[in-house]
Image: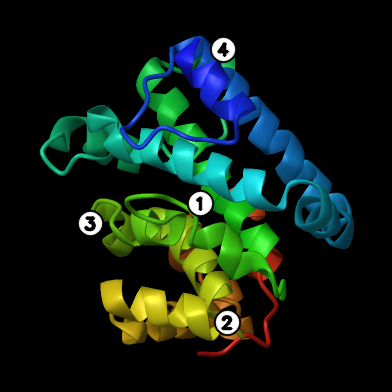
């Protein structure tokens, strides 16, 4: 196929691609495997991607982010009903029980998680994030629907990755500052820190406000010492 030929030649399509729900779910499973590896041995995963798939990883990330970003059921601001469903149903349900819309949503969220792992204190990370002929993966993250910057659960999923891309990375920070106010990220870090304070941990209302699986928590994704 033309797409397979593009991969074989090291070239990637400029226009958004279309993936069947089966391929989308398979891609999601593959990304989840990489995220599991990251949680077990992050230095190994970063070293492997840096040494063996340096260019390819950035291009694949860009391609999949383009697909997720162009999927109207998930990321178009006009698809308010679908987006509302996403906001109300952020969870880790089994893939075979999810509709196509949740398959795309899950792929996007797993990609965000993986991107955050890859760029933590990784000097080559910015090269991954600037891949893309039209918009880089980092720019695509900054252009996600408004719910990812306002809803507590979706903010937690997205902003931890953007913070990781900015930390100790002037190129990443400069790119983000062109798209977002840096105070948005500082406020996110401050809110997360308050949520982890001893007083907040005993506040049931705070716990219920962000019922996330532990893997999405900022404290399990980026070092507590990170400041912007």
Quadrant hosting residue 105: top left
Q: How many marks?
A: 4
Callout in the foreground (4, 1): 4
> Residue drawn at (71%, 53%), measured in percent from left and top?
54
Q: Nearer the viewer, residue 12 or 84?
A: 12
| Disc 2: which residue | 169
Callout in the foreground (4, 2): 2
Mark 2, secondary structure of its residue:
loop
> Residue drawn at (52%, 35%), measured in percent from left and top?
11
Q: Earlier in the sequence, mark 4 or mark 2?
A: 4
Residue 139 position, x and y percent, is 36, 61
Q: Mark 2: few, some, or many residues within 10 Å (few <14, many ≥20)?
A: some
Callout in the foreground (1, 2): 2
Q: Is residue 115 visible?
A: yes
Marks 4 and 1, how far apart at CA: 22 Å
Mark 1, secondary structure of its residue:
loop
- The answer to whether mark 4 and mark 1 are in CB contact below 8 A is no
Residue 206 drawn above or below residue 54 = below
Residue 197 drawn above or below residue 3 = below
Disc marking residue 96: 4
Residue 19 drawn above or below residue 14 = above
Q: Residue furthest left?
A: 78
Q: Mark 1: few, some, or many residues within 10 Å (few <14, many ≥20)?
A: some
Quadrant hosting residue 122: bottom right
Disc marking residue 211: 1
Q: Earlier in the sequence, mark 2 or mark 3?
A: 3
Marks 2 and 3, how far apart at CA: 25 Å
Residue 94 position, x and y percent, is 60, 21
- The answer to whether mark 3 and mark 1 are in CB contact below 8 A is no
Residue 203 position, x and y percent, is 51, 72
């Amino acid at each position: 196929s033309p797409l397979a030929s593009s991969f074989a030649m090291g070239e990637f399509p400029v226009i958004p691609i279309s993936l069947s729900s089966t391929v989308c779910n398979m891609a999601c499973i593959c990304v989840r495997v990489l995220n599991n590896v990251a949680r077990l041995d992050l230095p190994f995963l970063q070293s492997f991607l840096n040494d063996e798939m340096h260019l390819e990883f950035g291009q694949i990330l860009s391609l999949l982010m383009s697909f997720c970003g162009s999927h109207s059921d998930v990321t178009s601001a006009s698809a308010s009903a679908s987006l509302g469903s996403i906001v109300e149903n952020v969870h880790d349900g089994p893939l075979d029980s999810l509709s196509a819309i949740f398959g795309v949503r899950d792929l996007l969220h797993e990609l965000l998680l993986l991107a955050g792992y890859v760029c933590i204190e990784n000097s080559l990370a910015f090269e991954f994030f600037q891949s893309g002929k039209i918009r880089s993966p980092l720019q695509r993250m900054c252009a996600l629907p408004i719910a990812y910057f306002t809803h507590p659960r979706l903010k937690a999923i997205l902003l931890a990755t953007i913070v990781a891309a900015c930390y100790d990375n002037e190129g990443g920070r400069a790119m983000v500052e062109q798209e977002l106010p840096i105070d948005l990220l500082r406020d996110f870090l401050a809110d997360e820190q308050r949520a982890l304070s001893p007083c907040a941990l005993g506040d049931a209302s705070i716990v219920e406000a962000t019922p996330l699986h532990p893997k999405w928590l900022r404290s399990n994704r980026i070092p507590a010492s990170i400041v912007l």
